[in-house]
Every structure is written in structure tokens, then in C-alpha cells.
Image: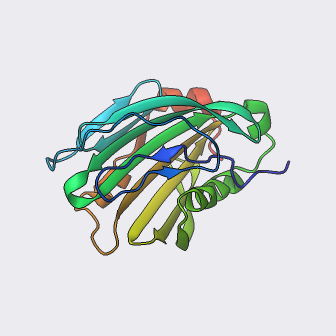
Amino acid sequence: MKTSRRVAPLAILLSVGGLGACASRQTAPESPAVQPASSAPAAVMQSTEGGFSVALPEPVSKESRAQVTDVGEVTLHTFVAVRSESDTAYYISYTDFPPAVMAQAKPGDVVSRASMGALESLGATGLSSRPLTLEGFPGWEVEGISGARRLKGRFYLVGPRLYQQLLLHPEGKPPQDAEAFFESFRLDPQVAAMLSGGRRS
């Protein structure tokens, strides 16, 4: 099966302060305003429907929207927090693709191409990329730069569900909780088992 480089395009990255709104190559309605997050330590946010938990600064803006992709219309669920004082944005999303389509794709290809699609959507130049795993599920990490902004993203495929985790910040000024943000991402074991049918590769 031919897997599109745009298998998981970003809808947007919401903007506050110097962070520009980054639209994907597909048309999407305007996003509601996002309230800037405080500088207080991040709190663990759990999404029962999404089947994951992650440490994010509050408040978190949540949104679901339809997206047209090469494999049909899907729903993109996004969670965004912004620290305006440090010009930093934290982004989590998940999308369920048609199981029949995803069953024909190589998981490693899906996550690597999703990472390339994210760089393209943000107009970023890739600096590094590498495969990784999360609790036995295939993933991919990418770093890039777009103007004066640094991007780091991780992408995981759990059955037909693609998770995206992104952090944008000024070049040379990563937030203190950058590593904690990425390492805090956890899957709900029951949801992961339901999505994958017990298969992890």
C-alpha cells in the first residue's frame, strides 16, 4: 500500500505571542482562542477517550475537528497548552484511521512519514530523526527548526490510532520541563490493548 507523507497532517499549532499559527496543507476552520498557560509546574492531564496521560501546563485547550486525508475523513483530537512568557507551545493529538487501511501499512513507515508531514506543515527543516518505541509500540522522534523556533516531536502508532506529541520553543531556550513533557506521555493499558488487539509491532 502506498502511504501518504501526509498521513497525519497537523491541523494547526495555536498561537500566543510570537508563536505563529501554523496551518496544515488542508483547509481547517479557525481555531478558538487559547488562554496562555501559567508558569506553574505542569499537571498530569488524562484523556479517557484518547487513552493517554501526559504532563501539561494549564490551562489546556481541547478541540476535535474533521480532517480530510488521503485515506478518507478522520477526526483529529487536539490538546494544546501555551506559555506566552516563554513563547512555548505544547501539543498533543490523536487520530483514528480506518483499521483496514492501516493494516496494510508498515507501522514504521507510518510514524516516520507522519513526522516528515509535521515538519512540512510547520515549514521546518529537519535536524535529526530516529525510531523509538513506547511500551512496545512503534514510534518516531524528529527535531527541526523553523525560523527562530525549535521543534521536537514524537509520533506513536497504536493499532489504527496515531498519537502526535510536539513542543515548539525559541531556538536555544527550551523550557525546563521539556524532557518531562515527553517522558510523561503514557498509554492507558486497556485502551492500548483494545486498539492493538494485543499486537505491539
Give the residue at the far left of this rendering. Answer: 40
For the residue pair 170 and 111, the one nearer the viewer reads as 170
- Is 175 situated above or below 59? below
Left or right: where 201 falls relative to 122: right
Q: Residue at coordinates 58% horizontally, 49% vertically from top-left?
A: 24
The image shows residue 103 at horizontal and vertical percentages of 77, 38
The x and y percentages for residue 36 are 24, 44
Residue drawn where x is 54% and y is 51% of the image: 155
| Residue 170 screen position, x and y as percent | 32, 68
In the rendered image, residue 136, in percent from the top left (x then y), is placed at 55, 48
> Relative to residue 168, is residue 103 depicted above or below?
above
Front one among 87 and 165: 87
Relative to residue 4, is residue 14 drawn left or right? left
- Name the residue located 57 percent from the left edge and 38 percent from the top edge: 28
Q: Which residue lies furthest to the right in this view?
A: 1
Q: In this view, does 183 lie above or below 157?
A: below
Q: Residue at x 25, y 62 (%)?
A: 175
